[in-house]
């Protein structure tokens, strides 16, 4: 499993209810932190958690630009009564004196750890010897983006190196996004991950239980075969495409990039590079 995700998971602290917390001014009176009732470990707020809280409270950050931190803390504490059962998700590294509220979720929010997502994905592919989590996976305080690729290369004409089919999964432990899976193709010689825009293999909000993730991801992997087949057929069909002149080929490439929602500037750069190739 990706080391960054494992290290992050080891820092995850317990969920805390709003009724157990209070806002206090931070040390330099430029904002507020949260403190557990009766505790002495102030928690800073991530930007995402602060945005969630302010939205829930119906306040705007700029409102507090005209008041000092003690008044800001007082105003926010008056609104904590609306969060008695909401969960404040935390990160903790006591050895570094680091405590943070990373997110704020409703009482019915179902926790799906990133570690469970990755473990379930690898099992759905048949184990670590049949799949790999490739570089490029991202983990922020809001969301996980992980690419899991099959060990078996896809046969594509004119391809240098290996091309692999896989899945990109998105998950948020703090309410930023639902669990989503989309099909991708991976070119290993350049590290390029290309999503297949028409593919929507799995999507589910964080409600109920997620006991069947391996089965869900296995079904997504099976469904992905259709998209991989479509791409393979399309690539094979390109072998028979012939242009009467280099300029015609460059124009066709430009139109293809724009139709795929690439920027006109990027399309022009590709066309120029091809023409001067």
Image (cartoon, rainbow, N blue to C red):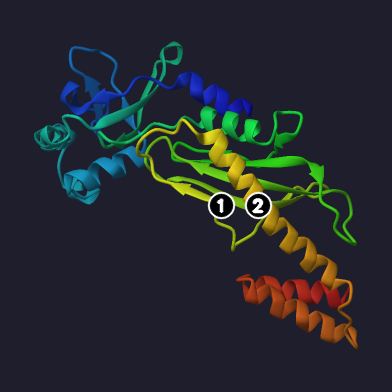
Q: Where in the figure is residue 233, as x and y percent of width and height?
A: 79, 65
- Seen from the viewer's position, the closer of residues 128 and 100 is 128
User: Which residue bears the numbered disc 2?
Assistant: 224
Task: State left or right for residue 151 relative to residue 166.
Answer: right
User: Which residue bears the numbered disc 1?
Assistant: 201
Q: Residue at x 16, y 33 (%)?
A: 73
Helix, strand or loop at label 2? It is helix
Above or below residue 199? Residue 70 is above
Task: State left or right for residue 10 relative to residue 251.
Answer: left
Above or below residue 57? Residue 269 is below
Task: State left or right for residue 121 relative to residue 273.
Answer: left
User: How many numbered circles are shown?
Assistant: 2
Give the numbered dot on residue 215.
Answer: none
Point out the image quarter for the N terminus.
top right
Q: Residue at x 85, y 85 (%)?
A: 247
Give residue 139's quadrant in the image. top right
- Mark 1 in CB contact with mark 2 (< 8 angstroms): yes
Q: Where in the figure is residue 133, as x and y percent of width and height?
A: 68, 36
Give residue 110's quadrant in the image. top left
Dot 1 or dot 2, earlier in sequence? 1
Task: State left or right for residue 167 relative to residue 254.
Answer: left
Give the farthest residue toward the bottom.
244
Give residue 104's quadrant in the image. top left
Helix, strand or loop at label 1? It is loop
- Seen from the viewer's position, the closer of residues 159 and 127 is 127
Q: Where in the figure is residue 130, as x and y percent of width and height?
A: 75, 33
């Amino acid at each position: 499993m990706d080391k960054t995700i494992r290290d992050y998971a080891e820092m995850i602290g317990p969920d805390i209810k709003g009724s157990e917390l209070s806002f206090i001014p931070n040390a330099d009176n430029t904002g507020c932190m949260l403190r557990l009732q009766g505790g002495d470990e102030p928690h800073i707020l991530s930007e995402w958690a602060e945005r969630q809280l302010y939205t829930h409270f119906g306040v705007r950050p700029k409102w507090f630009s005209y008041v000092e931190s003690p008044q800001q803390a007082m105003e926010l504490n008056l609104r904590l009564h609306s969060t008695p059962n909401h969960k404040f998700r935390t990160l903790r590294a006591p050895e570094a004196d680091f405590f943070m509220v990373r997110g704020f979720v409703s009482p019915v929010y179902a926790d799906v750890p990133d570690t469970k997502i990755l473990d379930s994905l690898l099992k759905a592919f048949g184990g670590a010897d049949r799949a790999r989590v490739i570089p490029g996976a991202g983990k922020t305080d809001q969301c996980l983006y992980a690419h899991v690729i099959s060990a078996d290369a896809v046969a594509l004409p004119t391809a240098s190196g290996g091309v692999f089919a896989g899945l990109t999964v998105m998950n948020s432990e703090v309410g930023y996004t639902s669990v989503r899976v989309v099909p991708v193709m991976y070119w290993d010689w350049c590290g390029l991950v290309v999503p297949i825009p028409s593919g929507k293999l799995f999507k589910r909000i964080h409600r109920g239980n997620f006991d069947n993730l391996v089965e869900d991801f296995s079904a997504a992997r099976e469904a992905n075969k259709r998209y991989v087949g479509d791409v393979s057929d399309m690539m094979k069909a390109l072998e028979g495409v012939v242009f009467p002149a280099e300029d015609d080929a460059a124009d066709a490439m430009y139109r293809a990039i724009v139709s795929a929602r690439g920027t006109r500037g990027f399309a022009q750069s590709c066309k120029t590079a091809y023409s001067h190739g």
